Image (cartoon, rainbow, N blue to C red):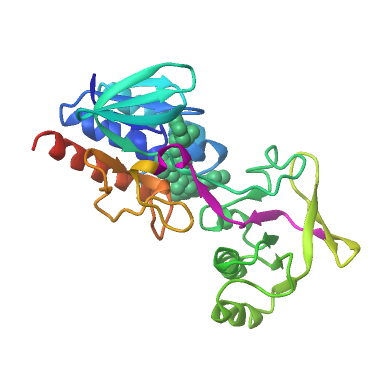
Amino acid sequence: MYDILIIGGGPAGLTAATYACRAGKSVLVLEKAAFGGQITWSPRVENFPGFLSVSGNELGDKLLEQAMEQGAEVELEEVTGLEKTNGTWTARCDSGAAFEGRAVILAAGAHPRMLGLPREEELVGSGVGYCAVCDGAFYKGKAVAVNGGGNSALQDALLLSESCSKVYLIHRRDAFRGEQKLVEALEQRENVEFVLNASVTALLGEEELRGVLVEQEGRSREIDVDGLFVAIGHQPDLEAFGQWLDRDKAGYADSGEDCLTVTEGLFVAGDCRKKAVRQLTTAAADGAVAALAACRWLDR
Ligand SMILES: Cc1cc2nc3c(=O)[nH]c(=O)nc-3n(C[C@H](O)[C@H](O)[C@H](O)COP(=O)(O)OP(=O)(O)OC[C@H]3O[C@@H](n4cnc5c(N)ncnc54)[C@H](O)[C@@H]3O)c2cc1C
């Protein structure tokens, strides 16, 4: 039996593991895909303190190495459910394995919704992105497109219009879902063009994106861009744990900055939690807060 089971080996989960181990707790991190989490999709990170530029894979490796150096144990397992009996948590995995712990930190993250186009995954980091705050600076002086119609898409387009030569905002309807104020701000920008009633149907370019094919009112249109930011929402990975949490409308764990949940002994950290800013720094911060809260709870 471990003191703390951590579900998710991204920046939040691995930071939590480092802090909990340093506080003297035994820790097991369960990760279903790649230690490092979402950031392993990114070839270049330039906003993580202490690193001028680092690949997402390298950063993920360093987070893992640091947690293991402090004594964390790790397993590549997908947790499919959590049970609690007489104060002991059991994490059940799809392999049939089960692990027990006295406390659990859920750090299962979120994933951006993809368009589902051929070669989309291959072009991530080579023109296709899901986070303008993260990657927008790589497109300074270049033409880009944003796909989406909610506040995130509008905010991404505004941010990109500060540094890009041209921003096409592509939306499948004739009106945006996001705030009118943001729409008006975009209308004032000379380098922003709305492409409405339009869907991106193909990604153009071999190794790097060089444009998108758009279907607009029955006609095909090719738009030359170096970057496409897909902003059609994110989805938290909490389906398997719903019974233990309050969640907001979008499915995120409804927890405050203290990372506590409505369930005793269950804590939540990182992108799977309701929050305004989802970044590496905020995920790492949550990891520390959740770990120390779990340690205090165990020592109560
Ligand atoms: C392409 C891209 C580029 C980005 N660039 C930047 C950037 O430059 N700067 C920046 O600050 N942020 C960037 N971000 C955002 C940043 O990656 C996230 O904010 C951060 O990774 C969140 O960390 P997390 O640990 O909360 O979640 P995640 O990174 O999502 O990690 C959660 C982990 O939990 C695992 N998991 C989920 N469910 C289960 C389960 N049931 N069982 C076991 N494991 C499970 C997942 O496989 C995943 O590895 C980028 C994101 C993307 C997608």
Q: How many marks?
A: 0
Q: Is residue 245 magenta?
A: no
Q: Position of residue 200 (x, y in %)?
A: 77, 56
Q: Position of residue 272 (x, y in %)?
A: 42, 47
Q: Is residue 235 magenta?
A: yes
Residue at horizontal 64%, vertical 65%?
164
Residue 276: name its quadrant.
bottom left
Compared to 101, does 266 lie above or below? Answer: below
Residue at horizontal 19%, vertical 40%?
292
Q: Is residue 117 visible?
A: yes
Left or right placement of residue 133 versus residue 183 in this view? left
Q: Give the quarter of the figure containing the N terminus.
A: top left
Residue 151: name its quadrant.
bottom right
Q: Position of residue 66 (x, y in %)?
A: 32, 28
Compared to 42, does 26 lie above or below? Answer: above
Q: Which residues are magenta?
A: 223-242
Extreme residue in the left direction = 300
Q: Is residue 36 visible?
A: no
